[in-house]
Image (cartoon, rainbow, N blue to C red):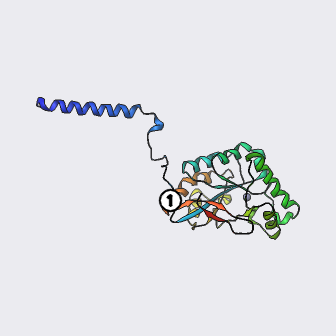
Amino acid sequence: MSRSLRTPIRTALVAALAALAALLSQPAGAAPTSASPTAARWTDCSGGYVGLTYDDGPNPASTTALLSALQAGQAKATFFIWGQHADQYPDLLRSEQAAGMWIGNHTYTHPHLPQIGEPAAYQQMVDTQNAVQRVTGQRPTLFRPPYGETNSQVKSDEARLGMAEVLWSVDSQDWNGASTAQIVQANATLRAGGIVLMHDGGYSTTVAAVPQILDGLAARHMCPGRITGTPGNAAVVTAP
Ligand code: ZN
């Protein structure tokens, strides 16, 4: 090796070692990884918006994990909660609010509203409005009747309380023992403007499905959207 080459080689070696040292000195959290979501995940929504919904919480067995999975994917969802669970687990409901999720009314104890009749049905709904307001300071504007069971009296109660009725176009069947793959597949059938029924009910399958659901939506240029509506009109899904 000639003397003239030594200096450039040594210079290159020093530079490489310096780069390696800089890399090793970085805190672990600062290194970019494939798992960290990019800031620009939901930029292409040309396929339309869909509403992800999770019913029956808050639930100590699943709410925190669901929120983590959704936040990791920079996604928002609507949580239709029981008033009783809001009173039992106010911190979990506040964590939903802090995570930017939307909170809807799903009655106080999940009865069959058409069967219990009035004034019990209205009481279930207003008690939940009050419970959510106590915890979050806000009153829901969305209502999902348990089991999707509604009638003219339920709709009248919704209107009196200023809530839009929200049913669903796809049932994930997570409540019925569906596997994670089956829950993911159900979400893959969502069309623009569709709403999928899932549960914050302690199901590990539902939690595990979140990353694949979001990846599937992104691949179809669809984005998680916000469900909105006015009493007496069909709910729509819009940009968050
Ligand atoms: Zn329910």
Q: Is residue 67 visible?
A: yes
Which residue occupies the extreme right position in the image?
Answer: 119
Ligand 1, what quadrant?
Answer: bottom right
> In this view of the protein, which residue sits in the foreground, 64 or 224?
224
59 left or right, relative to 156: left
Q: Is residue 62 left or right of residue 29?
A: right
Q: Position of residue 113 (x, y in %)?
A: 82, 63
Residue at 77% in and 61% down: 162
Q: Locate residue 167 relative to residue 182 in the image: left or right.
A: right
Measuring 79% from the left and 49% from the top, which residue is drawn there?
131
Q: Mark 1: which amino acid?
A: Ala
Residue 164: x and y in percent read 73, 63
Q: Is residue 53 above or below residue 58?
A: below
Is 230 on the left-hand or right-hand side of 18? right
Nearer to the camera, 50 or 229: 229
Residue denoted by label 1: 218
| Residue 119 image-quadrant placement | bottom right
Residue drawn 76% across the image and 50% down it:
132
Q: Looking at the image, which residue is at 12% across and 31% down?
A: 4
The x and y percentages for residue 172 are 63, 62
Residue 50, by quadrant, is bottom right
**Screen quadrant of the N terminus:** top left
